[in-house]
Amino acid sequence: MHPINDPQFVSRQYQSDRNLNARIALHQRFSTNKTPWSQRVFDQLLAALGARADAALQLLELGAGPGTLWAENQARIPASWRVVLSDLSPGMVATAQRNLAAAGCVAAYLVADAQHIPVATASCDAVVANHMLYHIPDRARALDEIRRVLKPDGILLAATNGVGHMAELHALAHRFNPSLPATDPSPSRFSFEDGLAELGARFAHVNLVRSDNSLVITEAEPLAAYMLSGIPGTVSPTQRGALHRFIAGELAEKGEIRITPVTGFLVASQPR
Ligand SMILES: C[S@@+](CC[C@H](N)C(=O)[O-])C[C@H]1O[C@@H](n2cnc3c(N)ncnc32)[C@H](O)[C@@H]1O
């Protein structure tokens, strides 16, 4: 099994929000798209709900991580919504609880595996599953569960990465250490194509909305921290010093390092 959906790797990786924060920080600092990511996600959620957005809705987030989506959009959450944040990692759920309390958000919390969602059939108006479906060992099971918990007019919003996501990062890692793969070594990562096919088998309507962006990186430390954050294909902590010097050398020579995220939203409705 590849680390990306190996339960032991995933559980260590997300024991706390430290690794994820290193990756988020790189995007926040160096994105050329100046609309914050959590704002782009919330815009998509409102667009997918359409005229129903002001109704009394039940929303469930799977793999919610530190709860950034809600904490950073606190002022936009209608009072009529009941929001439930869930994650497999108890540490992440505890962090989400703290972050939302600090932001003044009211929500409910669950430690839950998306492969066995402890929620009643046809009870959710929306399920959000951002950048997490590629971590699930039995993704078909999780997608069946999502379909089960959605109401007939419910929607799924799932952010994911397309093929070639941050390709320059892998090329850079390979130049630093030729034993590292020059391209993303992961198997099916719930790419746009995987998502359209797998959701298309379960929902009558599936739409892909691309969210184009690029990173123009001008400092070594945030990029080194990203590459050391432990996602598959990145660099071992034992090489921290050497990696830092390598990136600093690249920046001294070129002035900047450009990396292209390939990210978008799959919006699915009318569960079959
Ligand atoms: C890349 S993070 C994404 C966090 C958040 N959705 C975001 O976009 O910032 C992936 C999250 O999925 C969670 N996760 C991994 N496997 C899971 C599973 N089988 N069920 C529920 N959550 C899972 C991890 O604990 C982690 O918090």
Image: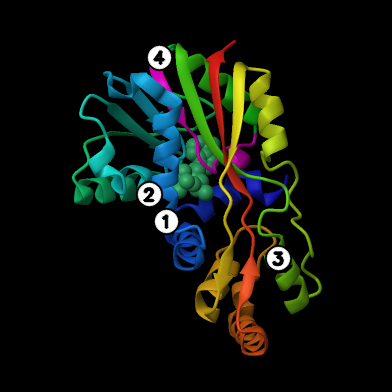
Q: Is the residue marked 2 within 8 Å of ligand 1, measured from its CB?
A: yes
Q: Which residues are magenta?
A: 124-137
Q: CA distance from mark 4 to mark 1?
A: 29 Å
Q: In the picture, residue 135 is in which quadrant?
A: top right
Q: In the picture, residue 175 is in which quadrant?
A: bottom right
Residue at x 27%, y 35% (from the top left corner) = 77
Lower position in the chain sequence, tag 4 or tag 1: 1
Residue at numbered disc 3:
168
Residue 266 location, x and y as percent? 58, 33
Lower position in the chain sequence, tag 3 or tag 2: 2
Query: Does the segment drawn in magenta span residue 128?
Result: yes
Instruction: Say whether marks 1 and 3 touch (CB < 8 Å).
Output: no
Q: Secondary structure at mark 1?
A: loop
Query: Does the segment drawn in magenta span residue 49?
Result: no
In the picture provided, is 209 more to the left or to the right than 21? Answer: right
Q: Secondary structure at mark 3?
A: helix
Residue situated in front as seen by the camera: 241 or 198: 198
Residue at numbered disc 4:
120
Residue 142 location, x and y as percent? 57, 27
